[in-house]
Image (cartoon, helix red, strand yellow):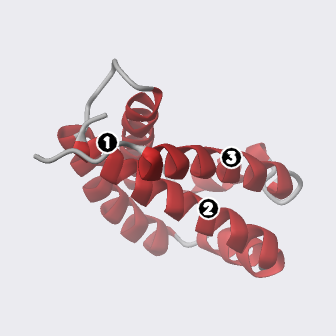
Amino acid sequence: MSPRTVFLAKVIGLFLLCMAASLVLNKASMLAALGATVREPEILLAYGIVFLLVGLTMVIGHNVWSGATPAIIVTLLGWAILMKSLLLLFAPSGVMVGLYGLVRFADFSSAYAAVIAVLGLYLAYRGFRAPRTTR
C-alpha cells in the first residue's frame, strides 16, 4: 500500500471507530442531533461545503481503483463523501428529510454502528499493520 493509503486508512479507520462508539454510547443524543440537523437547511449547506472539500481532496489525492482492498475502500469512501456533498448542496432540504426517513436510522442505529465499526476496525488494522515505507 502507498504511504497515502496507509495514512488515510489510519485516519478514516479511527474516525469510523470513534463515530461507531459515539453512536452506541450516546445513542439518544446522536439520534436527536441527526434528526434535528436533517431538518435545518442552513446546517446541511454548511455540511455540504465541508464535505465537498473533504470529498474533492480524497478523490483528487487518492483515486486508486486497483491494488490492496484498503486502497479501494478509501477511494470508494472518498467518492461517497463527494456524492453526499453534492446531494447536500443541490438537493432540496425535503429530500434529505425523506432520505433520513427512508434509511430508518433510528430503527437500525445499532446495525449501522456495527457496520461502521467493522469497516473502521478493518481500515485501522490494515493501516497500522502496514509495513513502514520510506518515501
Comes first in the chain, label 2 or label 1: 1
Residue type at mark 3 is Val
Residue reaching furthest to the top: 66
- Residue picked out by circle 3: 118
Q: Nearer the viewer, residue 48 or 19?
A: 19
Residue under the image location 34 percent in, 18 percent down: 66
Q: Nearer the viewer, residue 71 or 63?
A: 71
Quarter assignment of residue 29: bottom right
Kind of element beneath mark 2: helix
Residue type at mark 1 is Thr
Comes first in the chain, label 3 or label 1: 1
Question: Residue 131's spot in the image, x, y percent?
Answer: 34, 43
Q: Which mark is residue 17?
A: 2
Q: Nearer the viewer, residue 127 or 16?
A: 127
Kind of element beneath mark 3: helix
- Residue picked out by circle 1: 5
Question: Residue 71's spot in the image, x, y percent?
Answer: 37, 33
